[in-house]
Image (spheres, rainbow, N blue to C red):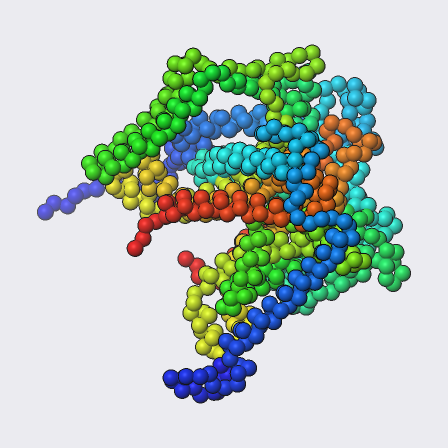
Amino acid sequence: MAIGVTTTPEKSKPSGSIINDPQVRGIFYQVITLVVLAAFVYWVADNTIENLKRANIASGYGFLNGRAGFDVGQSLIAFTSDSTYQRALLVGLLNTLLVAICGIFTATIIGFAVGIGRLSHNWLIAKLSLTYVEVFRNIPPLLVIFFWYSGVLAILPQPRESAALPLNMFLNNRGLAFPKPILGDGWQYTLFALVIAIVASIAVARFAHKKQDATGQRFPILWTVLGLVIGLPLLTFFATGSPITFDVPVAGKFNLTGGSVIGPEFLSLFLALSFYTAAFIAEIVRAGIRGVSKGQTEAAHALGIRPRLTTRLVVVPQALRIIIPPLTSQYLNLTKNSSLAVAIGYADLVAVGGTILNQTGQAIEVVTIWIVVYLSLSLATSLFMNWFNARMALVER
Amino acid sequence: MTTHQATFVRASMIEASSPPIAEGGLVRWLRKNLFATPKDTVLTIISLLVLAWLVPPAIQWLFLDAAWTGGGRGVCATVAQGGAQPEGWSGACWAFVNAKLDQFVYGRYPLEERWRPTLVGILFVLLLVPMLIPKVPYKSINAILLFAVLPIVSLILLPGGWFGLTFVETPLWGGLMVTLILSFVGIAVSLPLGILLALGRRSHMPVIKMLCTAFIELVRGIPLITVLFMASVMLPLFLPQGVTFDKFLRALIGVSLFASAYMAEVVRGGLQAIPKGQYEGADSLGLSYWQKMNLIVLPQALKLVIPGIVNTFIGLFKDTSLVSIIGMFDLLGIVRFNFTDANWASSVTPISGLIFAGFIFWLFCFGMSRYSGFMERVLDTAHKR
């Protein structure tokens, strides 16, 4: 609206010049943006089609059924060089998920420990935690990966001089060898028992909650659930005659035989991602706990609630509310950082995709697959965490 | 009434007695901070044991046993490995870092032309330092010199090809120089672009809003390495035949676009934190959209999100190390490249090189985070709770 133009209160039509009407201007700008964008997309598409025609690359996803012709170092499902590209990408995706889930699990544990450590009254613990955070936060994750890969794991002893670890595990420069479980007849019953135990635990938790709401009496949920989840499968396991045996790695003259081996690629990626992300999680946890006002603790103490219960019932639930949203983005960051696997040759989605890209030249298709997969992973994680967050969030009017 | 006869009146004050030994000095500090409860005591003892187990060997390895000088792998390998060190020796190989330091800074930039990056570096420091100290005047001239004149000067000096300077192609660039150029350009591009994207995302025009949101969410959803692959593999496909982009420039575009999406989200947080009354107040004064943003909203919003902005800068600085995956030699890339040098191949070379690179990255990132804390205190003029 131009200054100085008098408008009537009812204002049936815009007065003043049409050039100064913000709505008309808005539409004008948007039309211009759309036209420029359309022209740009047309130009890019035209160039791309031209370039692809010249390079003799057929666009489309037909190449996915072709023979891969390369091997991957570590795979969760059966894969040979005769498998299709499609299967190779699936192997990559599974490897990405594997390292991301393992990393998230460990990073959460280390992060919470360090974050709580930073708030400790113990001077030494607080300073050590601070040092950990400041060191790992300020170093590129790629460098941490290389540190483990070419700095630490590469100078471990040769296989024939493997370092023996407890539980029949061996560590050498080809990775970590550990006993491989062999499933005998009837192992399904143990799994079945575990499922039953989990279902029963949920039922017990519900019952306990109702009971507390009705009578005010607290039911020892933790111990019951622990007993159920650990005890029931163990009982079934022994009742069915211990159907799982272990193939123990044995140190031979030159190499280890038997057992399973986790490659140094996975180990270094996993360790680096865990340690790196843990530093960020620690800061989030610290901020979350600090964010709960001291009045809450004092009020709980004034009500006569014991310190341990105060932490569990008053501080932690409120802190989690602050912690969860940024924690989600750290989990997503870890998943995205797992793509750094390509630098050390761990066959994750990006590494496998890169190999396929080099072999077939199907750049657009491979990049599209990357984008779709990572976007869906992000979306799935944030949907889950939003659901969790909604359950945790303060119920307000 | 009888008057009480005072039998004893103290004429002077008693000397203050020293507090109980448990309540003062070192003992009190120890009791309060290290041995307050049995649990604390256990934790302290465990940490002390861990420290005693880790720190002396680390110092031994890093400093006392380290090979500081020497001209080849001999100084960093044991006799059995063909070197000069006694059997069982292990220590940092700083001689390797020492010998390769020039390369770590300049990459494979021609020796006789290295005065050019050095000159740019000196100019950069001379312009940056007064920019960072709040009390130094002439900030606007300084900013123009730093963000407009210096890039042009660098564009002439670094690649050369003009005014009789020999042309140095970008594959020869490397080391800390590349890391710093990438981060400086990334920072200088991503902040304004991020602000524009954030404003676009909060715009009332649906088309602009949708485009900005789509761009931000798309870029934030995928890893940087795929963006870099896109820049290095897909960009040539999009351009007409014959038009080629320099690889360095492509990485630069990738890194800048990636960082600007993150910056946009940080700035959006600041924009959302500004009360609606500020926007409405600016509107009622008759300010135009850009006046409203430049004079009223952005100064407040950006001040609020300084920690977030600096975090994005630090993230960007660390992320520049990823260009080594697409075959460029930034600091990390050139350090790793030198592991293959047969003249220096030994079992401790990689870890020494990586520790050195890590220390350099750490210095820059830690410096940035410290400076952001300082800036927060300087700008914290109001709204103190």
- Of A131 and B222, nearer the camera is B222
Q: Is residue B121 left or right of residue A136?
A: right
Which picture quadrant has residue B153?
A: bottom right
Pinpoint residue B21: horizontal percent, then vertical percent. Answer: 41, 31
Q: Residue A71: tell me if it is visible.
A: no
A243 vs B46: above or below: above
Quadrant for the C terminus of chain B, please: bottom left
Pinpoint residue A171: horizontal percent, then vertical percent. Answer: 62, 21
B31 vs A282: above or below: above
Q: Is residue A223 left or right of residue A181?
A: left
Residue in the picture at 67% in, 24% down? A173
Residue in the picture at 36% in, 26% down? A197
- Of B46 and A182, nearer the camera is A182
Q: Residue B36: tell me if it is visible.
A: yes
- Of A38 and B270, nearer the camera is A38
Q: Is residue B210 left or right of residue B171?
A: left
Q: Is residue B128 left or right of residue A12?
A: right
Q: Residue furthest left?
A: B1
Residue in the picture at 69% in, 66% down? B144
Pinpoint residue A46: horizontal percent, then vertical percent. Answer: 71, 60
Q: Residue furthest right?
A: B164
Residue in the picture at 29% in, 42% down? A300
How many numbered circles are shown?
A: 0
Pinpoint residue A57: horizontal percent, then vertical percent. Answer: 74, 48
